[in-house]
Image: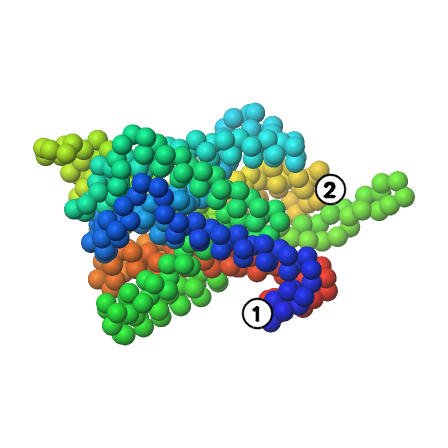
Amino acid sequence: MLSAFIPAMRTPEPRQRILLTLGLLALYRLGARLPSPGVDYPAVRECLDLAQGGDSAGIYQLVNLMSGGALLELSVFAIGIMPYITASIITQLLAAVIPRFEELRKEGQTGQNTITQYTRYLSVALAVLQASTLVALAAHGGLLRGCPRSALADRSLLAMICLVVVMTAGAALVMWFGELITERGVGNGMSLLIFAGIAARIPSQGMALLDGKGVLVFAGICGTALLTIVGVIFVEQGQRRIPVQYAKRVVGRKKYGGSSTYLPLKVNQAGVIPVIFGSSLLYLPNLLAQLTRKDSGSPARWQELIQKYLTNPSGPVYVGIYFTLIVFFTYFYVAITVDPRERAEEMKKFAGFIPGYRPGKPTADYLGHVLSRITPAGALYLGAVAVLPNLLLHFGATDSTQALALGGTSVLIVVSVGLDTVKQIESQLLNRNYEGFLR
């Protein structure tokens, strides 16, 4: 598979796309390590060392992992790509409930450009909100609890506003990186940025695991990760192929149709969105409890319950709620992104039909029945893969950061993005009569 990169690098257009993608990913990693103004980095490093393996950063683990460690280090790209992902998800949800967005989606490229512009505006607004929250938590010691030193060297209002502006600008720049990779590079830009953040953390966490737990535990974790990779590849490649026949049409002097193809429905139709949704929803109560908690005095009853049940990733309540949220969001996301009636209307518009089913409502009912059969398998698969690092924590195999870096969520994102990128490069090579990647 890797040998196919040689002819790809010899061809001008694929080479330019690959080099542009690698260059932007390198700039992204550089920005993730670039210090922000007004942050006391010796204090941050000390706090991170004290928090290693503890619960103080537990609610931010997944977001910190996707940013390549930039979040807790308060770097320029600390907010990362998460505002844009959240904004994209919100606009997709709005398209299902607001007629105006639905009309824009059906207008083609012009409507899609308008939705993209709305997504950018919403991303900047969310970046301001997230940066303000992050700086406020760092100023009040809520970002890494138990740290004896403040993460901010200057806690004046002007300095914190400057820090928020820098982080917001960093998030906007990351958003531009992602769009540039998608448009002129190789693969999905947002997914590749998350891929780069996770991949950058794996070697250091692997070495920390080897030094702290020994060779046997390290070998066991690597074996588990390898089995997880095999399982993820197997399920991610799995799809239900529904045969579709197109009738012959005569337009002028040309004939169209008369061909047979298939409609692929993936087992994991929702991707990694339910995992991101579930983790984000789980850390919101803890975030609210920290923002409303007073420096002196005992916490309220609801704050104690959140502290007891929703901050320990290895606890049975946390794992159960996390798994349930992932299953729920899998059903929810598939329901709003895959509309059987819309697929049936598209096939009917181009004179396509499924053998044995009439166009229109019978075809939509059949597609809905197939989705109802494969969605439970995809939901259980996503939930099982996502809670794997929590089970590693429960059995004491590793600490929380290492479990996430080497666990199922990371493997799911890395393998999914890798497969999608390889397929896109393969399609470009096949257009130039090169040997495919997956032969």
Residue 278 visible within the image: no
Within-10-Å neighbours for mark 1: few <14, some 14–19, many 20+: few
Question: From the viewer's perspective, is residue 196 above or below residue 86?
Answer: below
x and y percent of residue 116 in the render? 56, 35
Question: From the viewer's perspective, is residue 423 above or below residue 134?
Answer: below
Instruction: Give left or right: position of 307 versus 246.
Output: left
Residue 293 sits in which quadrant? top left
Mark 1 element type: helix
What separation in Å lies between label 2 and label 1 (alpha carbons)? 41 Å
Task: Give the mark nearest the N terminus, 2 or 1.
Answer: 1
Which residue does the image show at 53% across and 49% down from the upper left? 189
Q: Amino acid at mark 1?
A: Leu
x and y percent of residue 84 in the render? 47, 39
Which residue does the image show at 55% across and 39% down from the upper left? 339
Frontmost of labels 2 and 1 is 1
Residue indicated by mark 1: 2
